[in-house]
Amino acid sequence: MAKNLVIVESPAKAKTIGKILGADFSVMSSMGHVMDLPLKKLGVDIKNGFKPELVVVKGRKELVDGLKRAAVACESVYLAPDPDREGEAIAWHLQSLLKKAAKKATFHRVSYNEITPKAVREAFDHPTQVDMKRVYAQQARRILDRIVGYKVSPLLWTRVRSGSSAGRVQSVALRLICEREMQIIGFVPQEYWLLTAEVRKLVDPKDPFVVRLAQVDGKKADVKSKEEADRILADLEGRPLNVSKLSTREVSRKAPPPFITSSMQQAMSSRFGMAAAVTMRVAQKLYEGVDIGGETIGLITYMRTDSFSVSKDALGACREYIAKDFGHQYVPETPNLYRSRSGAQEAHEAIRPTDVNRTPASVGNILSPAELKVYRSIWERFVGSQMKPAVMKQTTAEVVAVPPAGRLTTYMFRASSSEVVFAGYMQATGFQDIKVEEKNEKEEAEELQQRLPPLSEGEPLERLKWLSDRKETQPPARFSEGSLVRELELNGVGRPSTYAQIISTLNYRRYVTREKRSLVPTKLGMDVNAFLVGHLSELFDVQFTARMEEDLDKVEEGHNDWTKMIEDFYGKFVQWLEKAKGPPADAGKVQAALDILGQVRNWAPEVKHGRRTYSDEKFVGSIHDQIKKAERAVSERQLLALAKIACRYEENVPGMRQMVVNAGLMDAATAAIEDKPDEKTLRKLDLLSKVQCDEPSQQGKKVFNDRKFMDSLVRRTTEGRDLSPAQKQQVDRLVLKYSSQIEGFEAMKGELGLDMPPVQEDQESAELLTLMTHVTKWRPESKRGTRVFSDKSFCESLKTQFERKRVLSPKQKIVLKKIVAAYHGQIPGFDEMASKYALKIPGKRAAHESAEDGHAGKAPLAAAGE
């Protein structure tokens, strides 16, 4: 074992670092974070300075134990995660865990912006200690996010949909997307008309070009209707056109700065439609190292940054490359410097190639297409950032329609063109992103793309035809991933390490979908946003979130105390949360409900559903305690819960439902049916209690147990609680499933509401299943992930289902046909059946595929058909 242990986040990074450092260093990976807040509870001691309860991440215990054993055997431990807040937190957590075991080891923190031999060795020659200011900033962010998610999400479960979640920053991003969608929905298009003329010179060159009506009587042309357009065209008829004015000017356009995280994501989204998460994943690979000629080399600097800074060595190398490859005329006198936003981490660099001489062409046959796209974009942007500005010549011609005698209205047309005089930085980046300062409309942009012939003032032009084109104003465009990142950045929401995760979370939660390159909010996303904005507008305000980000930056800079920052936030948060829970219930009604429930002497036993235990008695007691402590008012939702509980004890205390109605807690109709199971449901559950259920089955990580499910429903109804519509549907499904065991089912299914139309016998499936009874030699089972695929088990499951339902689904029959064909050698009379049911004997490749399709076991197709 080497005397020095180095710990990084990923195996790929460990491999690259290990090759650079050599045999004196043992390099291991932490696989990301090793400590975090617990999954199933808040994990923050709000009353004790917001102290976090940090635990080893689930599934990382063995890994941590291995790191401990390695640390004990070493003299020095170098903590080398990424150079940002998350990396600093990982380093601190590792040090906290390992120091207890490796008491004699010396701990160091090393960080580097690029994984190259020079940068890595320089970092290890000058190690530092963990920066606790950064750690506290990360910890504060994590605690803030946990508090918001843990406290707000339950409101969504009761008001919107179970399983919904809120996030301190993700919900602000959702708000931006939904507000844009509402603008689009509410947008009322306005028509306008573009009037143009196709013209040409009277002498060579006679190539046609287009002039657009720009002014009427010296004012900007603003044609709003067809009638107005027709009137102008009629007035223009017969007027000669002359060039009245020519103007030419040179426009200098400076090179854009090298990429930072946000601009890289925007560029990859707009140019290639690449998702932010994919961009970051590819960039991570380029940063951690790519095998080039047997050597693993990091191709780019660290990709999570908001700083435009570039090291002096990199600037010098870039200027030398430009002079050599493009020419000295492209090199500015002094390096181009760019100002980062306020609060940016200037210790970091912009994203750049680690070696500017490693051109995209030189690594094109090594990188994947996605990797090459990202690397080429980074390389071109960096090289271009250190080149002289591009210079363009813009020519504008003004053309007047000369008024004949008696006509007073004047019309001026305009045509423009632009050509590159000196390519400057665009020699490296390409010309695809040329923009002209005056451009503010699409039509003007199209004009600037045409080439004007040589013109002179006073020159007459021949009109070939007048043109009018009806247009409509357009609503604002939906956000793409790139434009959303830009919007978040402009508003100061999120940071380089969070942009991709924010968008991924919105997709994962199905709050947005991606249509082509646009992010479209789903109905669920709109509902969640409507509730959050309607009830917690202050919390999910864009400016408030931006100020929180600034406060976190100040914690990292050492200007803010993290506990004081969270304390200030929490004071506001509690007030907002109470308002969101709804107005307080009428105190008189609350007391009336408690007085009614005070008559209950025999409470229903506690009931456990999943990991949660429900107790009517304890809930009522908690309301008494809440009133006694006077810390917060009883909500309308809590009052409604008290009324529902009271209705369930009608048999215990006769007349209780009427007491609830008399107290104004619930209307008579609602109270009469509140939580009272209907007779049909009770009868169905009684019938099911007498059947012999199938053995429990497992699909993936889920276990399906009919008997256990039935028992949970029976317990619910014995408490006087009705079933949900979904639960009632499941009861009907189970009754039909086990109908063969229910005596006299055919006679009673009508009154139970299960009188289905007769199912026509599925003769095709019956014959196919009969064919499979001849098979005696089955292919062995195969396993993919946690799922086992077996032709034999699948056919048996189809047979069982067919005996019960007398029909198979279209998908099941497709797979069954493939399996029958795959076993054709064991099936007598196969050729006749093949002709009848279009069975195709597979080739070797097809046979393998059909086998995988057929390996369903107790699987998706059988389960879906039940």
Image: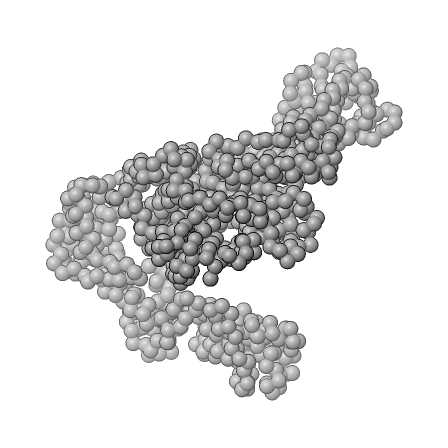
Left or right? Give the position of 434 relative to 632: right
Residue 61 in sight from this viewpoint: yes
From the top left corner, tell me how far across and down residue 591 is, in percent: 15, 45
> Residue 409, relative to residue 454: is it above or below?
above
> Residue 829, relative to residue 249: is it above or below?
below
From the top left corner, tell me how far across and down residue 631 is, in percent: 20, 41
Question: Which sits in the foreground, 441 or 489?
Answer: 489
Left or right? Give the position of 555 relative to 82: left
Left or right? Give the position of 81 relative to 560: right
> Residue 107, relative to residue 336: is it above or below?
below
Q: Residue at x 63, y 47 (%)?
A: 375
Q: Which of the 4 image quarters holds residue 368?
A: bottom right
From the top left corner, tell me how far across and down residue 50 is, in percent: 30, 44
Q: Residue at x 39, y 40 (%)?
A: 133
Question: Which sits in the foreground, 357 or 673?
Answer: 357
Residue 396 in sight from this viewpoint: no
From the top left corner, tell me how far across and down residue 82 is, in percent: 48, 47
Q: Residue at x 88, y 25 (%)?
A: 203
Asked which colour scheme the image uses, the reply is: one colour
Q: Residue at x 69, y 25 (%)?
A: 251
**Quadrant for the C terminus in the image:** bottom left
Question: Which sits in the foreground, 422 or 728?
Answer: 422
Number of residue marks: 0
